[in-house]
Image: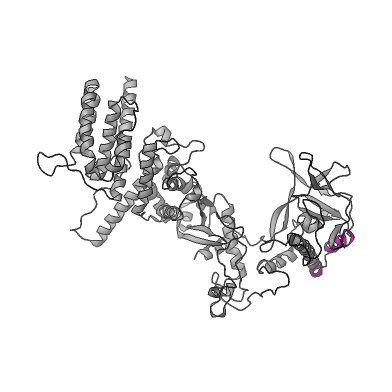
Amino acid sequence: MFLKALYDYAVRRRLLDGFPLETRDIHLLIPLNRAGELRFAHLLPLTHLDANGKVRPGQEHLMPRFAGSNSGGKAHFLAADTVAVLGRNKDTGEPVPADPKTAPRALNNQSKAFQHFWQQIEDALESTQDARFAALLAFRRHYLIEKDGKIESDLSFLESRPNKKTGKPEFVARTGPESQQCYALKKATLAFSVDGQPLTLEDENDPLRRYWFATYTKLAFQENVDDGSPESEPDKSPSVCLITGNMGQPIARSHKPPIKGVPRQTPYAYLVSFAEDSPAFSSYGFTMGENAPVSETAAAAYALALNHLLEDELLHYNLGPLAVCFWAKEHDDAARQINWLLNKAYPEQVKAFLRQPFEGSFDREVLKREHLYIIGLVANKARLVVTHWLSQPLEQALEHFRLWEEDLEVVSLKPKSDGATPRAGQQSPYAIPSLTRVSLRRSKDQEDKRLITERIVRLYRAAMEGISLPVTMLKPILDEFHSALVKNSEKNPPFALSRFALIKLILVRLERQRQEAVALADDSTRKEGDFMPTSQLADTSDPAYNLGRLLAVLEGLQAKYHNYEKKGAGIVERYYGTASSAPATVFPILCRLARHHLSKVRKEDEPAAKGIEARMTEIMSKFQPTQAGKPPHFPHILTLEEQGRFALGFYQQKAADAQAIRDAKEKESQT
């Protein structure tokens, strides 16, 4: 169960321990004494040094995390913007309405945020009797005065002045005794200091921490309700938590905190949620979380675990609409390595890893105990959908990945120096993002958002579970290859290594599936498929593969005939589509044309003509005529899978010919 795995991850990483706290940037402190009076006639600016040693505004402090979700009208505890803390519009400095009920609609949330901020301070004082909260409330009574239905701030350090760059008025606060010392309040976060001590939560022994931890637990699972409406009480019945199996814990009505980081999601999205007003989610008298009881602690734990994974760039990968998260039972480094291997590693880096997996990271016994988890998520507005869930021993995952790499490996059309080592900014050809993109038809607005979730998920499953890919995946790949052949654009090179690696993978998995089915059937009369694609040019009797090879040789002959000068559309641009689907209609024409080309080439370069003719003869011998004295017999129609074999044969023959030319040139240069 993936929720249990996420819960265990959160417990192991102790994600719940400090969850009520978060690091926030505080820009200005309001300096008070114990009586709530201002210690200075200005605010205290907080700054930090960046990586280059420059002074930047803001300073990180450990502060209370916002409890629940905020759709407007609420404020953080202890530190917030000018609206919530001082009751002044942060853009204009205008006072906000004192009563949300009578405030104009456009200002309603501002008034609510101000009231919410100070209500939290009052609640804290009532619960803790902490003198610091008494000082804050005294400050409010002295300086934030309600007048004519608005909050009038009696604070001399606030003013509106022209912006130095734009000349437009902006709301600022003075940060020193000199008039030019000021700070724009539009994006400022304000906090307090009392008797020179910032009111933050860095001190683990501060009793305010204990208060906030207890308060956060209560607030985080409350439902969002408008003022004045009844608030639903959380279920306190002794239900069994479906994640932990524990009894007697409060059941979460909704599973908070919300998940963030999945492409195309709303600001707040949930993996498990129930609409209170929907009868479909109120079966047998249950409402909301009662339908699938999960304790508040367990719900928070799995949500925190997902958010942690989605925040760590090494533990997740976003591709198109899909977010894929990786984690391991004990060692995060193992999951990070798998993520890197699947999505970023170059072929030579993968081979080095597979020679000695996790060398220097884990010993053999640890590797045997480790377990890998992978989850795929897509967003459907405010809800998240699990597209795939994988749980398997790490050793088994590595075996599947090893087979994945073997099935992908295909000869490169370019020299090894161009196709084997990474260059800056270059995507690995065998990485899943590269493979996914070659399954997408090119367009003017080629973007990852157009990638299809199902195809991405299938590729991850093929890599980690060893499944076969459907033959229908060949269709968009072959269509785009044909289009790229005709256009021959640098932006979409027809002979991209990723394209043919994926074609080979699909063909290999389909053939292996057939062979396994034959073995299981134990049927000696049933004929096995006899063509298993290899990384290099294959010697096989498969008609489709050899037709592709033949077209590549005929194209090379035509190029030699024209002295490798491009003169309009060649036979590939003109005939590839028909040759790869209905070869019997095209290849007799191409063979007659080849005789004409050979006669000219033979006069100008007899050794080259002999080499080309020998390759043609070798391939043509695999197409025996139906009767003696008749021309070779070519298939009338090729299936989609056979069209994939045709493309692979075409590519591998071109790669073999290109390598032969490079070898000949190298040999010639040495003599």
Quarter holding residue 150? bottom right
Tell me where residue 160 appears, x and y as whole percent. 83, 47
Magenta span: helix, strand or loop, mainly?
helix
Quarter holding residue 536? top left
Name the residue nearer the viewer: 195 or 496: 496
Q: Is residue 32 left or right of residue 3?
A: right
Quarter holding residue 653? top left
Q: Quick check: can you spot residue 357?
A: no
In the orientation shown, which residue stands out farthest toward the front? 104
Quadrant assignment for the C terminus: top left
Tell me where residue 478 appears, x and y as whole percent. 35, 45
Magenta stretch: residue 132 in it? Answer: yes
> Number of labelled discs?
0
Question: What residue sits 15% from the left and 42% below the top?
Answer: 624
Question: What residue sits 26% from the left and 33% below the top?
Answer: 554
Question: What is the magenta range?
Answer: 125-146
Q: Is residue 175 left or right of residue 467?
A: right
Tell me where residue 659 appears, x and y as whole percent. 33, 32
Magenta stretch: residue 368 in it? Answer: no
Question: What residue sits 25% from the left and 41% below the top?
Answer: 547
Tell me where residue 261 appears, x and y as whole percent. 58, 54
In the orientation shown, which residue stands out farthest toward the bottom? 284
Q: Quick check: can you spot residue 101?
A: yes
